[in-house]
Image (spheres, helix red, strand yellow):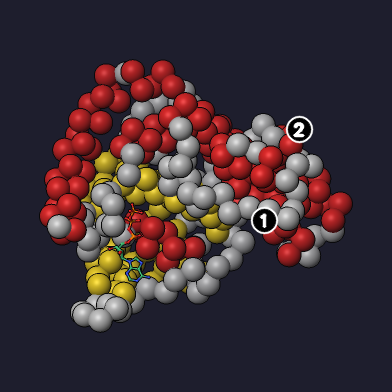
């Protein structure tokens, strides 16, 4: 289970003094159960806005969002989210951070502990379960954040530039780790990025958004074989997709820069 339907979803923000800011034009997008979709677009095009709406952290000005036919009306453990900053609770150990949502759902401490330890092993953090977040590197904190989002067994994973603050090497490893987890669990994923290579490497479909107000400019299928590893980045098919998407995104980045100036 995990079919996401976004129908005519738009978002208008009240302007501080002047006119309202249209962050998103009404968008239609369906993400099938188990699909990995990347949202790609220039800075400020409304990617995070759309993700926050799907997470239920914000309400659309128009349209509706449904997960498995159930309207999204607020945050829910059925939609796990990972942000650019790990946002772990500094006063809890890594294990307790990962188990936190399970305790909230009424599971016993022993169950939450066991589930957290299993997930931490899957993201290569078994040895760090008893540490506090500040003892972990940025990449390790993001792995813990991913484990925490997976803990309540969500139908949908929402990832907002989760590797954006990491160095290139760590980012590459994290992308491979995410694909491993996805191959194993086949969650539906909506992944926001402005990194074209990241989108191609991870996704089965890439939705390119226009400069603000964001609307769908193009939808590109990434028919590259899975499971994928870093060798994919040196394949001609990868280069071809990168060239095609670079043209699409560059036009919008130029428009975004003009809007900002
Ligand atoms: N709470 C808010 N009030 C007013 N305007 C907002 C608010 N949140 C976002 N915006 C505006 O809406 C637009 C879209 O923002 P959003 O953060 O969704 O873009 P983004 O594509 O995720 O950008 P980036 O890649 O830089 O994170 C921007 O112009 C932003 O300034």
Residue pictured at 16% horizontal, 38% vertical: 247
Vertical relation: 237 (above or below) 74: above
**Residue 3 visible here:** yes
Q: Nearer the viewer, residue 49 or 84?
A: 84
The secondary structure type at the circle numbered 2 is helix
Whether the residue under disc 2 has CB within 8 Å of ligand 1: no
Q: Are marks 1 and 2 in contact (CB under 8 Å)?
A: no
Q: Where does the image place residue 223, in percent across and percent down from the top left? A: 33, 32
In the rendered image, the quadrant that contains the N terminus is: bottom right
Residue pictured at 20% horizontal, 30% vertical: 243
Q: Where does the image place residue 157, in percent across and percent down from the top left? A: 52, 51
Sequence-first disc among 1 and 2: 1
The residue labelled by disc 2 is 127
The secondary structure type at the circle numbered 1 is loop
In the rendered image, the quadrant that contains the C terminus is: bottom left
Nearest-to-viewer mark from 1 and 2: 1
Q: Is residue 209 left or right of residue 124?
A: left
Q: Dividing the picture into quarters, in which one does residue 206 lie?
A: top left
Q: Quadrant of ligand 1?
A: bottom left
Q: Which mark is residue 64?
A: none
Q: Dividing the picture into quarters, in which one does residue 183 lie?
A: top right
The residue labelled by disc 1 is 89
């Amino acid at each position: 289970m995990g079919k996401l339907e976004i129908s005519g979803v738009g978002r208008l923000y009240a302007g501080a003094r002047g006119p309202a800011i249209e962050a998103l034009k009404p968008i239609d997008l369906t993400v099938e159960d188990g699909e990995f979709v990347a949202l790609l677009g220039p800075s400020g095009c409304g990617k995070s806005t759309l993700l926050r709406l799907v997470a239920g952290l914000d309400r659309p000005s128009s349209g509706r969002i449904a997960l498995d036919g159930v309207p999204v009306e607020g945050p829910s453990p059925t939609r796990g989210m990972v942000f650019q900053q790990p946002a772990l609770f500094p006063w809890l150990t890594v294990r307790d951070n990962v188990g936190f949502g399970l305790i909230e759902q009424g599971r016993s401490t022993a169950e939450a502990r066991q589930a957290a330890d299993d997930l931490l092993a899957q993201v290569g953090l078994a040895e760090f379960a008893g540490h506090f977040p500040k003892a972990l590197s940025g990449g390790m904190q993001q792995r813990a954040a991913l484990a925490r989002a997976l803990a309540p067994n969500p139908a949908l994973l929402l990832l907002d530039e989760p590797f954006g603050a990491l160095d290139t090497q760590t980012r590459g490893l994290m992308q491979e780790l995410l694909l491993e987890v996805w191959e194993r669990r086949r969650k539906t994923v909506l992944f926001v990025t402005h990194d074209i290579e990241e989108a191609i490497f991870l996704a089965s479909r890439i939705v390119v958004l226009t400069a603000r107000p964001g609307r769908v400019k193009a939808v590109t299928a990434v028919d590259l074989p899975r499971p994928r590893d870093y060798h994919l980045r040196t394949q001609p098919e990868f280069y071809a997709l990168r060239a095609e998407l670079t043209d699409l995104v560059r036009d919008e980045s130029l428009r975004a820069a003009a809007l900002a100036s």
